[in-house]
């Protein structure tokens, strides 16, 4: 992926809103690339947890960018043809459906193939099956939701997410969790990312990361507030990577059992407890890794990074 | 300036300092050097005699030395220095006749009188440096709230902004130069590894020999580690710099204002069921607290946004600087536990019985084999967090965090996994629920409070009458004892009056 080469070829840029021109910086691409590298490392995890500690001058955008990199590296699911899937369903089966405009979750009621095109009733409404772009059966559903179909955006295209985009929306890996200060993370998600000088409209980070901020029909990443995290442990077992953003989140590192834990240390905060906790974990239970050699990730200027593995 | 602009500047400033380093201006200060020399003599005597008698004098002298290094304003505006010198004089008078070191007491009295008799030379150098850059393009950073407030009274009239490192971080100022008053080791590494200004100069007395630049805790092992170099310039009257006792005799840490902890007083035995091993914490506002290694404790981070300030922290991550939220009169845990048990209704007896059963067995093993042997056997069984074994046996910690650890522990105790695991998990879930409700109430109270008072005074009373609580106190941890003591379980986590922290604030 071109973005992973950071400052070498393509520079990425960030802007506060889609209306502003992005400001390129040499640290944006590498942070995105770290998420991708961590995802690729997964196949080599072998029962051990990879812990990456990243110290940045300020925490802003770091967790969101690393998260985008993780999402961009995820494989697209292979989904069967919607009609075929619908034929096999029992009434009451929870579904997620993607059409041209929306992503909808709801319970399946019936399929009628006697009309053309076939119709399906789910989530309380009747739909043309030929308008369904992707469909996936869900293991469970708390409430029926409908949200606008997210757009893939220029940076997503660069990573090839436009291929199988509908399948990704219908059956996302949803294996990423970000723990941090909710209000700050929300501000980060509102920023937009683009390639310097490509002329394409910038992509909101929110559309790349699809954070689960409640009442959404599909999401790629679960989001937790550090302040309330104690009451939400343990994390669901399908979470494969956790980004702990800041000291309040990193304090929980020992309780994270996902194969990948990426810790964002904010150097602008004087409290060094979080860094000390990570060093203690590394020195007592960790086996050091070279982040450059083993993960293939050179730290950009202004960023300190170390990695180690611990037994799960 | 947009948030992204500001962030780009921050990355650039960090890179700039990493390649160009910081400047240290070491200023000759004969009077201060003399006080420093006598302080070293005093420390040597105290090391021979042991603490006790000397504690208050040592506290006062260290405090004066700290002020000398961090508050360079002219004497006419330097209440802190004159008051510090008076405190030393007072303690010297108290010790007259009680100790045989009259010559040392004379020297201390003379040296402390001398530093409060003339303007600190550091101040003149600082003023000149500011003049070179211009007051609008620089900022002065003080070592703590008191130092920056005092310097602000002096420099504020000249249009110079004086802030603490924390205030500078939150100020969103865009300045090219910061003058930091005090040696680098008095500051956290963030000041130089995540600098607000691209140029940083430390202004400190030349007699203070430790000029090490702090680095982030991960730097020694990190790729891309940021190691800031220093360019040292000396100026002023550098006579009388040699202290009578060789450098390196006493580590600089011993000269910093800090409590005298002595050695552990408790006997070397396991605590009984009514007791806990606890560490003493000194808190702002003349308070202290015994903190046991049990459940998480409620803390407050005033720099988080509204609604995300109240949190739970592991006991192991409590540090000097942490703000604890403490109930007056009763621990939060006890109040929480009572509410939880009442919510459990009919299930309460069975749940209490199964919790008591496995904890009793574990405590029995600890009593029989000793905690270290238990930890070793548990490690051999595959349990991860074995260092928590003693805490698991206590009633105030529900269960091991990890399901895996808990199951292996139960097996090791010879118990079936159920109903112990299910009951403990139900108890934990109920505690989380009640605790989340309390958290929201505390958030509401905190959002209504003036948190700037917390940074200024180190403590703040929150009035929670409206939500059915007795008073809650937010207070800063000033220091933590390096060793634990055995204390009554009932005394743990309740703040009490204590004057040991008087020289720290």
Image (tube, rainbow, N blue to C red):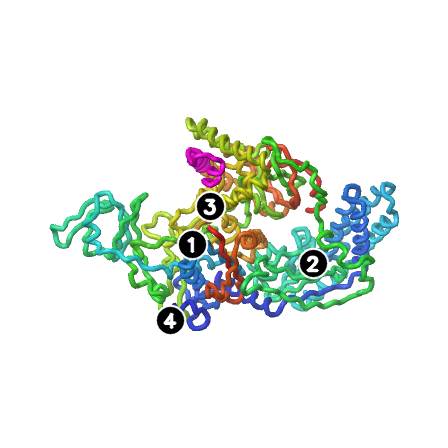
Tag nearer the camera, 3 or 1: 1
A229 lies above or below B219: above
Tag nearer the camera, 4 or 1: 1
B287 lies above or below B213: above
Disc 3 from disc 2: Cα separation: 38 Å
Answer few, some or many: residues within 10 Å of disc 1's Cα (few below 14, many 20 plus, some between 14 and 19).
many
Residue drawn at x 83%, y 52% as measured from the top left: B113
Magenta span main SS: helix
Mark number displayed over residue A241: 1
The answer to whether residue B230 is left or right of residue B464 is right
Tag nearer the camera, 4 or 3: 3
Q: Say which chain tag 1 marks.
A: A
Disc 4 from disc 2: Cα separation: 49 Å
Question: Horizontal and vertical percent for residue A179?
Answer: 46, 51
Q: Which residue is mark 4?
A: A198
Question: Horizontal and vertical percent for residue A303?
Answer: 53, 63
Disc 3 from disc 1: Cα separation: 16 Å
Q: Is residue A107 magenta?
A: no
Instruction: Specify start and end residues of the magenta stretch as a single range.
Output: B406-429
Q: Which residue is mark 3?
A: A229
Q: Say which chain tag 3 marks.
A: A
Q: Which residue is mark 2?
A: B182
Q: Do the residues marked 4 and 1 share a common chain?
A: yes
Give the total number of marks visible in the rendering.
4
Disc 1 from disc 2: Cα separation: 42 Å
């Amino acid at each position: 992926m071109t973005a992973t080469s950071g400052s070498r070829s393509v520079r990425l840029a960030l802007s506060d809103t889609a209306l502003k021109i992005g400001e390129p910086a040499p640290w944006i691409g590498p942070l995105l690339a770290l998420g991708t590298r961590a995802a690729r490392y997964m196949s080599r995890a072998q029962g051990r947890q990879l812990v990456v500690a990243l110290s940045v001058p300020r925490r802003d955008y770091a967790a969101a960018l690393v998260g985008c990199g993780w999402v961009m590296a995820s494989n697209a699911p292979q989904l069967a043809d919607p009609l075929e899937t619908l034929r096999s369903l029992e009434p009451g089966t929870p579904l997620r459906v993607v059409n041209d405009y929306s992503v909808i979750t709801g319970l399946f009621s019936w399929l009628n193939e006697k009309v053309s095109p076939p119709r399906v009733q789910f989530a309380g409404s009747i739909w043309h099956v030929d308008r369904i772009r992707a469909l996936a059966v869900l293991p469970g559903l708390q409430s029926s939701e409908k949200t606008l179909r997210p757009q893939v955006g220029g940076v997503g295209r660069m990573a090839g997410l436009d291929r199988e985009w509908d399948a990704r929306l219908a059956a996302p890996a949803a294996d990423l969790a970000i723990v941090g200060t909710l209000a700050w993370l929300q501000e980060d998600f509102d920023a937009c990312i683009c390639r310097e000088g490509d002329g394409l409209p910038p992509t909101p980070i929110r559309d790349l990361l699809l954070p689960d901020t409640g009442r959404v029909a599909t999401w790629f990443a679960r989001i937790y507030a550090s302040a309330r995290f104690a009451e939400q442990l343990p994390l669901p077992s399908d979470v494969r990577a956790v980004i702990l953003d800041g000291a309040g989140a990193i304090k929980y590192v020992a309780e994270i059992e996902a194969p990948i834990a990426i810790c964002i240390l904010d150097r602008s905060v004087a409290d060094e407890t979080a860094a000390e906790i990570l060093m203690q974990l590394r020195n007592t239970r960790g086996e050091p890794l070279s982040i450059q050699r083993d993960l293939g990730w050179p730290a950009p200027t202004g960023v300190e990074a170390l990695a180690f593995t611990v037994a799960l | 300036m947009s948030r992204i602009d500001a962030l780009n500047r921050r990355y650039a400033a960090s890179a700039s300092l990493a390649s160009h380093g910081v400047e240290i201006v070491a200023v000759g200060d004969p009077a201060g050097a003399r006080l420093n020399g006598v302080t070293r003599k005093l420390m040597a005597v105290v090391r021979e005699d042991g603490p006790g008698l000397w504690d208050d004098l040592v506290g006062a002298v260290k405090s004066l030395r700290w002020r000398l290094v961090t508050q360079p304003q002219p004497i006419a505006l330097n209440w802190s220095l004159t008051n510090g010198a008076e405190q030393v004089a007072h303690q010297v008078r108290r010790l007259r006749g009680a100790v045989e070191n009259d010559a040392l007491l004379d020297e201390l009295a003379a040296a402390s009188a001398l530093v409060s008799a003339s303007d600190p030379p550091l101040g003149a150098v600082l003023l000149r440096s500011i003049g070179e850059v211009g007051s609008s393009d620089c900022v002065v950073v003080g070592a703590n709230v008191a130092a920056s407030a005092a310097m602000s009274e002096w420099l504020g009239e000249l249009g110079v902004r004086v802030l603490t490192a924390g205030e500078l971080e939150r100020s969103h100022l865009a300045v090219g130069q910061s003058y930091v008053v005090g040696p680098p080791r008095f500051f956290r590494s963030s000041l130089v590894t995540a600098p607000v200004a691209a140029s940083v100069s430390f202004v400190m007395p030349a007699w203070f020999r430790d000029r090490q630049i702090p680095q982030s805790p991960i730097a020694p092992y990190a790729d891309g580690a940021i190691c800031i170099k220093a360019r040292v310039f000396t100026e002023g009257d550098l006579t009388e710099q040699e202290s009578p006792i060789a450098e390196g005799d006493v580590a600089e840490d011993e000269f910093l204002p800090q409590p005298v902890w002595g050695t552990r007083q408790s006997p070397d035995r396991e605590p009984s069921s009514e007791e806990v091993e606890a560490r003493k914490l000194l808190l702002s506002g003349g308070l202290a607290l015994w903190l046991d290694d049990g459940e998480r404790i409620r803390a407050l981070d005033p720099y988080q946004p509204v609604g995300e300030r109240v949190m739970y922290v592991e006991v192991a991550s409590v540090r000097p600087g942490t703000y604890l939220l403490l109930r007056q009169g009763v621990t939060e845990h006890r109040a929480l536990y009572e509410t939880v048990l009442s919510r459990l209704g009919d299930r309460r007896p069975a749940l209490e019985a199964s919790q008591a059963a496995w904890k009793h067995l574990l405590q029995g093993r600890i009593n029989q084999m000793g905690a270290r042997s238990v930890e070793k056997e548990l490690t051999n069984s595959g349990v991860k967090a074995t260092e928590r074994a003693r805490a698991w046996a206590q009633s105030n910690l529900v269960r091991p965090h990890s399901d895996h650890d808990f199951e292996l522990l139960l097996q090791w105790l010879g118990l079936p996994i159920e109903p112990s695991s299910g009951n403990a998990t139900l108890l934990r879930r109920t505690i989380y629920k009640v605790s989340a409700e309390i958290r929201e109430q505390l958030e509401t109270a905190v959002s209504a409070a003036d948190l700037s008072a917390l940074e200024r005074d180190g403590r703040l009373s929150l009035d929670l009458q409206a939500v059915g609580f007795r008073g809650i106190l937010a207070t800063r941890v000033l220091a933590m004892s390096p060793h634990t003591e055995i204390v009554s379980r009932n005394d743990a986590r309740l703040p009490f009056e204590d004057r040991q922290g008087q020289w720290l604030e």
